[in-house]
Image (cartoon, rainbow, N blue to C red):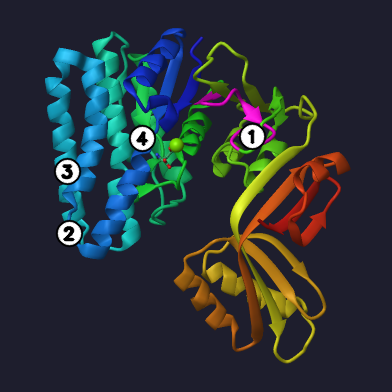
Amino acid sequence: MNEIYIEKFGGASVNSAETVRNVASIILTQNNKRIIVFSAMGKTTNALESIVKDFYKTKKIKSSLIKQIEDNHLVIIKELFGDGSKEIESKLKIVIKEIEETLIKYKNSTINLLYDAIVSYGEIISTLIISTYFKCIGIEHILIDARQVIKTDSNFRGANVDWRLTKKTIKEQVSPLFKENQIIITQGYISSDAKNNPTTLGREGSDYSAAIFAYFLKAKNVTIWKDVPGLLNADPKIFSKTVKFDKIPFSEAIELSYYGASIIHPKTLKPLENKSIPLFVKSFIDPKASGSVICHCKSTTPNAPSYIFKDNQTLLTLFPKDFSFIVEERISAIFSIFAQYGIRINLMQNSALSFSVCFDLIDQELLYDLIDKLAPNYTVKYNDGLRMITIRHYNEKAISSVIKDEEIIIEQRSRVTAQFLVKK
Ligand code: ASP
Ligand code: MG
Protein backbone atom coordinates (compact mmCIF):
# COMPACT_ATOMS: atom_id res chain seq x y z
CA MET A 1 0.00 0.00 0.00
CA ASN A 2 1.28 3.42 -0.87
CA GLU A 3 -0.95 5.43 1.36
CA ILE A 4 0.43 8.54 2.96
CA TYR A 5 -0.16 9.55 6.54
CA ILE A 6 0.34 12.97 8.13
CA GLU A 7 1.41 13.54 11.70
CA LYS A 8 1.84 16.78 13.56
CA PHE A 9 3.79 17.36 16.74
CA GLY A 10 3.21 20.67 18.52
CA GLY A 11 5.54 22.81 20.61
CA ALA A 12 4.87 21.01 23.90
CA SER A 13 5.80 17.66 22.37
CA VAL A 14 9.32 18.89 21.53
CA ASN A 15 10.08 21.27 24.40
CA SER A 16 12.92 19.23 25.93
CA ALA A 17 15.40 16.49 25.08
CA GLU A 18 13.18 14.02 26.87
CA THR A 19 10.09 14.91 24.84
CA VAL A 20 12.07 14.84 21.57
CA ARG A 21 13.24 11.32 22.45
CA ASN A 22 9.63 10.40 23.17
CA VAL A 23 8.59 11.69 19.72
CA ALA A 24 11.31 9.54 18.14
CA SER A 25 10.00 6.49 19.98
CA ILE A 26 6.46 7.19 18.73
CA ILE A 27 7.71 7.54 15.15
CA LEU A 28 9.63 4.29 15.39
CA THR A 29 6.48 2.32 16.16
CA GLN A 30 5.14 2.76 12.62
CA ASN A 31 6.60 2.23 9.22
CA ASN A 32 4.33 3.80 6.66
CA LYS A 33 4.95 6.72 4.31
CA ARG A 34 4.54 9.88 6.30
CA ILE A 35 4.94 13.60 6.43
CA ILE A 36 5.77 14.70 9.93
CA VAL A 37 5.04 18.34 10.68
CA PHE A 38 6.73 20.04 13.63
CA SER A 39 6.06 23.27 15.51
CA ALA A 40 8.67 25.44 17.17
CA MET A 41 10.05 24.03 20.42
CA GLY A 42 8.12 24.95 23.57
CA LYS A 43 7.39 28.65 23.77
CA THR A 44 9.90 29.73 21.11
CA THR A 45 7.30 31.51 18.97
CA ASN A 46 6.36 33.76 21.91
CA ALA A 47 10.04 34.52 22.52
CA LEU A 48 10.54 35.43 18.86
CA GLU A 49 7.44 37.59 19.03
CA SER A 50 9.05 39.58 21.87
CA ILE A 51 12.15 40.11 19.72
CA VAL A 52 10.01 41.47 16.89
CA LYS A 53 8.08 43.84 19.16
CA ASP A 54 11.23 45.14 20.80
CA PHE A 55 13.13 45.55 17.53
CA TYR A 56 10.24 47.27 15.79
CA LYS A 57 10.07 49.81 18.59
CA THR A 58 13.77 50.42 19.22
CA LYS A 59 15.27 49.42 15.83
CA LYS A 60 18.06 47.88 17.86
CA ILE A 61 18.79 44.22 18.39
CA LYS A 62 18.45 43.22 22.02
CA SER A 63 21.07 40.49 22.25
CA SER A 64 19.81 39.16 25.57
CA LEU A 65 16.51 38.15 23.94
CA ILE A 66 18.27 36.38 21.08
CA LYS A 67 20.71 34.73 23.45
CA GLN A 68 17.80 33.35 25.46
CA ILE A 69 16.48 31.58 22.38
CA GLU A 70 19.90 30.21 21.55
CA ASP A 71 20.41 29.01 25.11
CA ASN A 72 17.03 27.29 25.33
CA HIS A 73 17.87 25.27 22.24
CA LEU A 74 21.43 24.63 23.39
CA VAL A 75 20.15 22.94 26.54
CA ILE A 76 18.13 20.52 24.40
CA ILE A 77 21.00 19.98 21.96
CA LYS A 78 23.54 19.23 24.71
CA GLU A 79 21.28 16.67 26.25
CA LEU A 80 20.38 15.02 22.95
CA PHE A 81 23.83 14.89 21.40
CA GLY A 82 26.20 14.85 24.39
CA ASP A 83 29.80 14.94 23.19
CA GLY A 84 28.70 14.89 19.57
CA SER A 85 26.96 18.26 19.78
CA LYS A 86 29.61 20.49 18.17
CA GLU A 87 28.34 20.26 14.61
CA ILE A 88 24.70 20.97 15.39
CA GLU A 89 25.76 23.74 17.79
CA SER A 90 27.56 25.51 15.00
CA LYS A 91 24.57 25.03 12.70
CA LEU A 92 22.38 26.64 15.36
CA LYS A 93 24.85 29.54 15.57
CA ILE A 94 24.48 30.13 11.84
CA VAL A 95 20.68 30.30 12.13
CA ILE A 96 20.91 32.66 15.11
CA LYS A 97 23.16 34.90 13.04
CA GLU A 98 20.59 34.73 10.26
CA ILE A 99 17.88 35.95 12.66
CA GLU A 100 19.98 39.04 13.37
CA GLU A 101 20.63 39.62 9.68
CA THR A 102 16.92 39.21 8.94
CA LEU A 103 16.02 41.83 11.55
CA ILE A 104 18.32 44.27 9.79
CA LYS A 105 17.07 43.28 6.35
CA TYR A 106 13.43 43.98 7.30
CA LYS A 107 14.22 46.98 9.50
CA ASN A 108 12.06 49.36 7.49
CA SER A 109 9.30 47.02 6.48
CA THR A 110 5.87 46.70 8.06
CA ILE A 111 5.62 45.05 11.46
CA ASN A 112 3.68 42.13 9.99
CA LEU A 113 6.28 41.28 7.38
CA LEU A 114 9.05 41.65 9.94
CA TYR A 115 7.04 39.40 12.25
CA ASP A 116 6.69 36.57 9.74
CA ALA A 117 10.31 36.82 8.67
CA ILE A 118 11.45 36.39 12.28
CA VAL A 119 8.95 34.07 13.96
CA SER A 120 9.33 31.49 11.21
CA TYR A 121 12.79 30.73 12.62
CA GLY A 122 11.17 28.87 15.53
CA GLU A 123 10.11 26.07 13.20
CA ILE A 124 13.34 26.25 11.20
CA ILE A 125 15.40 25.67 14.35
CA SER A 126 13.16 22.93 15.73
CA THR A 127 13.25 20.90 12.52
CA LEU A 128 17.00 21.43 12.17
CA ILE A 129 17.59 19.93 15.61
CA ILE A 130 14.99 17.16 15.28
CA SER A 131 16.17 16.14 11.82
CA THR A 132 19.79 16.02 12.94
CA TYR A 133 18.84 13.97 15.97
CA PHE A 134 16.74 11.55 13.92
CA LYS A 135 19.65 11.00 11.54
CA CYS A 136 21.86 10.36 14.49
CA ILE A 137 19.61 7.61 15.86
CA GLY A 138 18.90 6.06 12.47
CA ILE A 139 15.43 7.38 11.60
CA GLU A 140 15.86 7.84 7.88
CA HIS A 141 14.03 10.77 6.38
CA ILE A 142 14.32 13.86 4.25
CA LEU A 143 13.88 17.38 5.63
CA ILE A 144 12.08 19.88 3.41
CA ASP A 145 11.48 23.61 3.83
CA ALA A 146 7.74 24.25 4.07
CA ARG A 147 8.27 27.84 2.91
CA GLN A 148 9.05 26.55 -0.56
CA VAL A 149 5.98 24.37 -0.70
CA ILE A 150 3.10 26.09 1.07
CA LYS A 151 2.36 29.17 -1.03
CA THR A 152 0.13 31.98 0.21
CA ASP A 153 -0.96 35.53 -0.45
CA SER A 154 0.85 38.39 1.31
CA ASN A 155 -1.53 38.71 4.24
CA PHE A 156 1.31 38.47 6.74
CA ARG A 157 0.61 36.87 10.15
CA GLY A 158 -2.48 35.09 8.83
CA ALA A 159 -1.73 34.35 5.20
CA ASN A 160 -4.33 32.70 2.97
CA VAL A 161 -3.22 29.59 1.15
CA ASP A 162 -2.86 29.85 -2.62
CA TRP A 163 -4.45 26.47 -3.31
CA ARG A 164 -3.59 26.41 -7.00
CA LEU A 165 0.09 27.15 -6.54
CA THR A 166 0.44 24.93 -3.49
CA LYS A 167 -1.12 22.02 -5.37
CA LYS A 168 1.56 22.46 -8.02
CA THR A 169 4.50 22.72 -5.61
CA ILE A 170 3.35 19.71 -3.61
CA LYS A 171 2.87 17.67 -6.76
CA GLU A 172 6.23 18.66 -8.20
CA GLN A 173 8.39 18.92 -5.13
CA VAL A 174 6.89 16.70 -2.45
CA SER A 175 5.16 13.70 -4.05
CA PRO A 176 8.25 12.54 -5.96
CA LEU A 177 10.24 12.39 -2.72
CA PHE A 178 8.16 9.42 -1.59
CA LYS A 179 9.77 7.30 -4.31
CA GLU A 180 12.94 7.15 -2.27
CA ASN A 181 11.89 8.23 1.19
CA GLN A 182 9.53 6.79 3.71
CA ILE A 183 9.48 9.84 5.97
CA ILE A 184 9.42 13.54 5.11
CA ILE A 185 9.96 16.04 7.90
CA THR A 186 8.84 19.64 7.58
CA GLN A 187 7.73 22.73 9.47
CA GLY A 188 4.19 23.68 10.34
CA TYR A 189 2.91 27.26 10.37
CA ILE A 190 5.37 28.73 7.86
CA SER A 191 4.93 29.47 4.20
CA SER A 192 5.82 32.09 1.59
CA ASP A 193 4.10 34.45 -0.82
CA ALA A 194 4.44 34.74 -4.60
CA LYS A 195 7.54 36.92 -4.17
CA ASN A 196 9.02 34.39 -1.75
CA ASN A 197 8.58 36.67 1.24
CA PRO A 198 8.16 34.58 4.37
CA THR A 199 4.55 34.33 5.59
CA THR A 200 2.82 32.49 8.44
CA LEU A 201 -0.59 30.89 8.67
CA GLY A 202 -1.58 32.45 12.02
CA ARG A 203 -0.72 31.39 15.56
CA GLU A 204 -1.09 27.67 16.19
CA GLY A 205 -1.15 27.24 12.43
CA SER A 206 0.85 24.00 12.32
CA ASP A 207 -2.34 21.96 12.49
CA TYR A 208 -3.48 23.74 9.37
CA SER A 209 -0.20 22.93 7.59
CA ALA A 210 -0.78 19.25 8.34
CA ALA A 211 -4.27 19.52 6.83
CA ILE A 212 -2.93 21.23 3.69
CA PHE A 213 -0.45 18.42 3.06
CA ALA A 214 -3.16 15.84 3.77
CA TYR A 215 -5.53 17.52 1.34
CA PHE A 216 -3.14 17.50 -1.60
CA LEU A 217 -1.58 14.11 -0.93
CA LYS A 218 -5.00 12.52 -0.27
CA ALA A 219 -3.65 11.22 3.00
CA LYS A 220 -5.22 8.25 4.70
CA ASN A 221 -5.50 10.19 7.94
CA VAL A 222 -3.91 12.94 10.04
CA THR A 223 -2.75 12.54 13.63
CA ILE A 224 -2.21 15.54 15.86
CA TRP A 225 -0.18 14.62 18.94
CA LYS A 226 -1.03 16.70 22.00
CA ASP A 227 -0.48 16.79 25.74
CA VAL A 228 -4.11 15.90 26.42
CA PRO A 229 -5.75 12.48 25.94
CA GLY A 230 -7.87 13.67 23.00
CA LEU A 231 -10.68 16.11 22.39
CA LEU A 232 -12.19 17.06 25.70
CA ASN A 233 -15.54 18.67 26.43
CA ALA A 234 -13.83 21.46 28.42
CA ASP A 235 -10.42 22.94 29.08
CA PRO A 236 -8.72 20.71 31.68
CA LYS A 237 -6.88 23.79 32.99
CA ILE A 238 -10.24 25.21 34.08
CA PHE A 239 -12.37 22.12 34.72
CA SER A 240 -11.32 19.43 37.16
CA LYS A 241 -13.55 16.83 35.50
CA THR A 242 -13.65 16.52 31.73
CA VAL A 243 -15.12 14.03 29.29
CA LYS A 244 -13.06 12.77 26.35
CA PHE A 245 -14.93 12.42 23.08
CA ASP A 246 -14.10 9.19 21.25
CA LYS A 247 -15.71 10.28 18.00
CA ILE A 248 -16.92 13.64 16.86
CA PRO A 249 -18.40 14.75 13.52
CA PHE A 250 -16.48 17.33 11.48
CA SER A 251 -19.42 19.73 11.67
CA GLU A 252 -19.50 19.63 15.46
CA ALA A 253 -15.72 20.07 15.79
CA ILE A 254 -15.92 23.04 13.41
CA GLU A 255 -18.67 24.58 15.56
CA LEU A 256 -16.62 24.06 18.72
CA SER A 257 -13.56 25.72 17.27
CA TYR A 258 -15.73 28.53 15.93
CA TYR A 259 -16.93 29.28 19.46
CA GLY A 260 -13.32 29.38 20.64
CA ALA A 261 -12.50 25.87 21.83
CA SER A 262 -8.75 25.79 21.50
CA ILE A 263 -8.75 22.25 20.24
CA ILE A 264 -7.43 22.63 16.76
CA HIS A 265 -6.58 25.56 14.55
CA PRO A 266 -9.99 26.53 13.11
CA LYS A 267 -8.97 26.40 9.46
CA THR A 268 -7.71 22.82 9.78
CA LEU A 269 -10.96 20.93 9.57
CA LYS A 270 -12.57 22.15 6.36
CA PRO A 271 -9.98 20.75 3.91
CA LEU A 272 -10.06 17.43 5.75
CA GLU A 273 -13.83 17.32 5.77
CA ASN A 274 -13.93 18.01 2.03
CA LYS A 275 -11.65 15.07 1.32
CA SER A 276 -13.10 12.83 4.05
CA ILE A 277 -9.75 12.50 5.78
CA PRO A 278 -10.20 11.56 9.45
CA LEU A 279 -8.26 13.55 12.03
CA PHE A 280 -6.98 11.73 15.10
CA VAL A 281 -6.05 13.65 18.23
CA LYS A 282 -3.80 11.59 20.43
CA SER A 283 -1.65 11.98 23.51
CA PHE A 284 2.10 11.93 23.06
CA ILE A 285 2.32 11.07 26.75
CA ASP A 286 0.20 7.95 26.30
CA PRO A 287 0.57 7.14 22.61
CA LYS A 288 -1.11 3.72 22.83
CA ALA A 289 -4.36 5.23 24.14
CA SER A 290 -7.10 5.60 21.57
CA GLY A 291 -7.50 9.39 21.64
CA SER A 292 -10.30 10.99 19.63
CA VAL A 293 -11.22 10.97 15.99
CA ILE A 294 -12.96 13.70 14.02
CA CYS A 295 -14.67 12.12 11.04
CA HIS A 296 -17.82 11.85 8.98
CA CYS A 297 -19.96 10.30 11.69
CA LYS A 298 -23.54 11.01 12.75
CA SER A 299 -23.09 12.21 16.31
CA THR A 300 -20.61 12.77 19.07
CA THR A 301 -19.80 9.86 21.37
CA PRO A 302 -20.10 9.97 24.27
CA ASN A 303 -22.83 12.55 24.33
CA ALA A 304 -21.94 15.39 26.75
CA PRO A 305 -22.26 19.18 26.86
CA SER A 306 -19.11 21.10 25.79
CA TYR A 307 -18.00 24.19 27.71
CA ILE A 308 -15.98 26.94 26.07
CA PHE A 309 -14.67 29.94 27.99
CA LYS A 310 -13.41 32.91 26.04
CA ASP A 311 -11.91 35.77 28.04
CA ASN A 312 -10.92 39.30 27.04
CA GLN A 313 -14.20 40.04 25.34
CA THR A 314 -15.21 43.60 24.55
CA LEU A 315 -18.84 44.63 24.19
CA LEU A 316 -19.76 47.74 22.23
CA THR A 317 -23.31 49.04 22.31
CA LEU A 318 -24.36 51.57 19.70
CA PHE A 319 -27.33 53.90 19.98
CA PRO A 320 -28.20 55.88 16.82
CA LYS A 321 -27.92 59.59 17.58
CA ASP A 322 -30.90 60.49 15.45
CA PHE A 323 -33.12 58.10 17.42
CA SER A 324 -33.90 56.19 14.28
CA PHE A 325 -34.52 52.49 14.52
CA ILE A 326 -31.69 50.06 13.97
CA VAL A 327 -32.60 48.74 10.57
CA GLU A 328 -30.83 46.68 7.96
CA GLU A 329 -28.95 49.50 6.22
CA ARG A 330 -27.53 50.66 9.51
CA ILE A 331 -26.43 47.18 10.45
CA SER A 332 -24.68 46.69 7.15
CA ALA A 333 -22.84 50.03 7.56
CA ILE A 334 -21.77 48.98 11.06
CA PHE A 335 -20.57 45.62 9.76
CA SER A 336 -18.48 47.22 7.09
CA ILE A 337 -16.73 49.41 9.68
CA PHE A 338 -16.02 46.33 11.80
CA ALA A 339 -14.69 44.52 8.75
CA GLN A 340 -12.29 47.41 8.05
CA TYR A 341 -10.84 46.84 11.52
CA GLY A 342 -10.54 43.09 10.94
CA ILE A 343 -12.79 42.43 13.91
CA ARG A 344 -14.44 39.05 14.23
CA ILE A 345 -17.79 39.34 15.91
CA ASN A 346 -18.47 36.64 18.49
CA LEU A 347 -21.99 37.59 19.44
CA MET A 348 -24.46 40.35 18.63
CA GLN A 349 -27.83 41.50 19.77
CA ASN A 350 -30.12 44.21 18.50
CA SER A 351 -33.15 45.98 19.81
CA ALA A 352 -35.15 48.73 18.17
CA LEU A 353 -32.83 51.44 19.44
CA SER A 354 -29.50 49.76 20.06
CA PHE A 355 -27.07 47.29 18.58
CA SER A 356 -24.54 45.38 20.71
CA VAL A 357 -21.52 43.56 19.40
CA CYS A 358 -19.06 41.40 21.29
CA PHE A 359 -15.56 40.64 20.00
CA ASP A 360 -12.06 39.68 21.12
CA LEU A 361 -9.93 42.32 22.77
CA ILE A 362 -8.21 44.53 20.24
CA ASP A 363 -5.41 46.96 20.73
CA GLN A 364 -6.59 49.89 22.90
CA GLU A 365 -5.58 52.47 20.28
CA LEU A 366 -7.49 50.59 17.63
CA LEU A 367 -10.56 50.40 19.85
CA TYR A 368 -10.55 54.18 20.40
CA ASP A 369 -10.07 54.65 16.70
CA LEU A 370 -13.06 52.40 16.01
CA ILE A 371 -15.20 54.30 18.53
CA ASP A 372 -14.18 57.61 16.89
CA LYS A 373 -15.25 56.23 13.57
CA LEU A 374 -18.68 55.32 14.95
CA ALA A 375 -19.10 58.45 17.06
CA PRO A 376 -20.58 60.80 14.43
CA ASN A 377 -23.66 58.60 14.09
CA TYR A 378 -23.87 56.67 17.35
CA THR A 379 -23.52 57.09 21.04
CA VAL A 380 -21.13 54.29 21.91
CA LYS A 381 -20.87 52.54 25.27
CA TYR A 382 -18.39 49.82 25.98
CA ASN A 383 -17.41 47.18 28.52
CA ASP A 384 -14.22 45.18 28.38
CA GLY A 385 -12.57 42.29 30.18
CA LEU A 386 -15.72 40.19 29.82
CA ARG A 387 -15.97 36.43 29.58
CA MET A 388 -18.04 34.57 27.04
CA ILE A 389 -19.25 31.17 28.14
CA THR A 390 -20.60 28.93 25.41
CA ILE A 391 -22.26 25.61 26.15
CA ARG A 392 -22.99 23.30 23.23
CA HIS A 393 -25.68 20.69 23.77
CA TYR A 394 -26.65 22.41 26.96
CA ASN A 395 -29.17 21.47 29.61
CA GLU A 396 -30.17 23.33 32.78
CA LYS A 397 -27.77 21.32 34.90
CA ALA A 398 -24.88 22.16 32.56
CA ILE A 399 -25.77 25.84 32.74
CA SER A 400 -26.04 25.97 36.52
CA SER A 401 -22.70 24.19 36.84
CA VAL A 402 -20.89 27.15 35.24
CA ILE A 403 -23.16 30.15 35.72
CA LYS A 404 -23.20 30.88 39.43
CA ASP A 405 -23.17 34.43 40.69
CA GLU A 406 -21.60 36.12 37.70
CA GLU A 407 -23.44 39.16 36.40
CA ILE A 408 -24.92 38.14 33.04
CA ILE A 409 -24.76 40.93 30.47
CA ILE A 410 -26.17 39.11 27.45
CA GLU A 411 -27.70 35.68 27.24
CA GLN A 412 -28.63 33.86 24.04
CA ARG A 413 -29.91 30.35 23.46
CA SER A 414 -30.53 28.38 20.32
CA ARG A 415 -31.64 24.76 20.32
CA VAL A 416 -28.06 23.51 20.62
CA THR A 417 -26.02 26.39 21.95
CA ALA A 418 -26.36 28.62 25.02
CA GLN A 419 -24.10 31.66 25.32
CA PHE A 420 -23.56 33.95 28.26
CA LEU A 421 -21.52 37.10 28.25
CA VAL A 422 -20.60 37.68 31.86
CA LYS A 423 -18.57 39.96 34.10
CA LYS A 424 -15.87 37.86 35.72
N1 ASP B 1 4.78 27.77 16.53
C1 ASP B 1 3.55 28.38 16.13
C2 ASP B 1 2.83 28.92 17.35
O1 ASP B 1 3.26 28.70 18.46
C3 ASP B 1 2.68 27.49 15.35
C4 ASP B 1 2.16 26.28 16.09
O2 ASP B 1 2.67 25.91 17.13
O3 ASP B 1 1.23 25.66 15.60
O4 ASP B 1 1.83 29.57 17.19
MG1 MG C 1 1.84 25.32 19.36
Q: Amino acid at mark 3?
A: Glu
Q: Amino acid at mark 2?
A: Lys
User: Which of the two labelled residues, at mark 3 and mark 2, occupies the earlier sequence position?
Assistant: 2
Residue under numbered circle 3: 98
* Image location (x, y in percent) of residue 57: 26, 64
Q: Is mark 2 within 8 Å of ligand 1?
A: no
Q: Which mark is residue 60?
A: 2
Residue at horizontal 51 percent and vertical 76 percent from the top? 368
| Amino acid type, callout 1 | Glu
Q: Quadrant of residue 271?
A: top right
Q: Pointers 4 and 1 in contact (CB under 8 A)?
A: no
Label 4, secondary structure: give it: loop
Residue range (magenta)? 221-237
Estimate the x, y position of residue 374 in percent, counting from the top left: 59, 81
Frontmost residue, 33 versus 346: 346
Question: Relative to residue 48, is residue 373 drawn left or right?
Answer: right
Find the distance from the CA under tag 2 to the CA under tag 1.
46 Å
Assess whether mark 1 and mark 2 are in contact (beta carbons under 8 angstroms): no
Q: Is mark 4 within 8 Å of ligand 1?
A: yes
Extreme residue toward the bottom, this view:
322
